[in-house]
Amino acid sequence: MPAAPSFAAIAGTALTLLAALYALAALLCRGRLGLHPGHAGSTDRARGQTAWAPVTVLKPLCGAEPRLEDNLAGLCTQTHPCYQLVFGVRAPDDPAIAVVERLARRYPAVDIRLVVDPRVHGSNLKVSNLINMMDAARHPWLVLADSDIAVEPDYLARVTAPLAAPDVGIVTCLYHGRPLDNVWSRIGALFVDTWFAPSVRVASSGGSCAFAFGATIAVRASTLRAVGGVEVLKNRLADDYRLGELTRNLGLRTVLSDVCVGTDVTEDSLRALWARERRWMQTIRSLNPLGYACSFVTFTLPMLALGVALAPTAWNATLAVAGGAARLGLHFRQPAPGVPPPGHARYAPLRDCLLLAEWLSAFAGTTARWRGHRLPIDTRSASVADRSVAAARPSLRQRSWTPRR
């Protein structure tokens, strides 16, 4: 009579199976997308829409990022018939001011507003910047977007289209990595293209809508007021996720747009990459501790290797090969139509092992570093952060600047 399999063999087979199934899902799932008018899969209501509400784009800026001018210029050539661009900085000597001034001269027909305001309203300085910018917004629909994304000319028209449905709270969109020409930047882009974005598509395909991404959030101004305005996010590390959560609490839907923007990945060292990705991991842990603890199966290659080591059978090895092939397939799959595959499959083992190390390290620590500042990881314990920044708030008045036409 054959001996019963050991616990290690059972655990190894189960781990290999779960990791392989996830890798296959990550390769095949596309997510449940909200489509723009004119798309072949659009709903009848969206397809019949012919008018667009005016839109204000709010872009908090900080420093001269490598592709900042090109990224912001993409917003100046939008096909949307009526939109305003509001840029905001905290420091009067911020190099981003010169970039906005150049854009105002290049695109005199575009409604551009720059707000320079050093006031601090909470521990999250990006949200603090947004609070200072809100008075400059003129239109009923808003798009909040990070400074390091690249967009196509139809971006605004497409991401705001679902807001025409009264049951939609926010529209958000995924992104693909745009690395600089160095190894660590390319590995960082693979974090987005072969781990983060596929995990969102898997969750979305399974019916989840518990997400919102700072790359783009489109929301009606009335909805933002209903949740308490951007002020309620001032002490939240994951301000984007919290905004989506608040709108869902009103009974409104979160829509994942079919737009996929590009996001710059500019880290040029392991240390810089580790700091950024560990902060992302810490943020995910703070939002969903149980889900974070179970996410080890998404680190495909080291999990497959561990599974085979625990259960070195021919069947398990075959399953691991299939899972590894699916994982490598992500390097040859387009993140979105018109976007080239990420490539660089040779980095896959390093990428997955680095993810595993970051995942383990992110279980520790109560703060995260962002742009030289420390933010509390537990975003629901915000009172301490409020008191810590109160004494640092300057008494200077807001200064707004509008380019001459």
Image (spheres, rainbow, N blue to C red):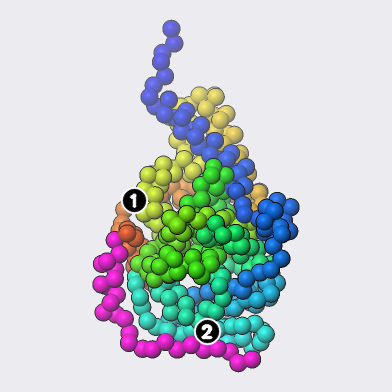
| Residue drawn at (44%, 11%) of the image | 2
Q: Is residue 238 above or below residue 396?
A: above
Residue 45 visible at all? yes
Give the residue furthest to the top: 1
Circle 2 crowding by C-alpha within 10 Å: few under 14, some 14–19, many from 20: many
| Residue drawn at (25%, 72%) of the image | 387
The image quadrant that residue 81 belongs to is bottom right
- Badge number at residue 25: none
| Residue drawn at (55%, 47%) of the image | 204
Circle 1 crowding by C-alpha within 10 Å: few under 14, some 14–19, many from 20: some
**Three-letter amino acid code at the position of disc 1:** Phe
| Residue drawn at (58%, 78%) of the image | 85
Quadrant location, the C terminus: bottom right
Q: Which residue is mark 2?
A: 114
**Three-letter amino acid code at the position of disc 2:** Leu
Residue 255, percent from left and from top: 56, 55
The tag earlier along the polypeptide, 1 or 2, is 2
Q: Which residue is mark 1?
A: 363
Residue 166 is inside the magenta segment: no
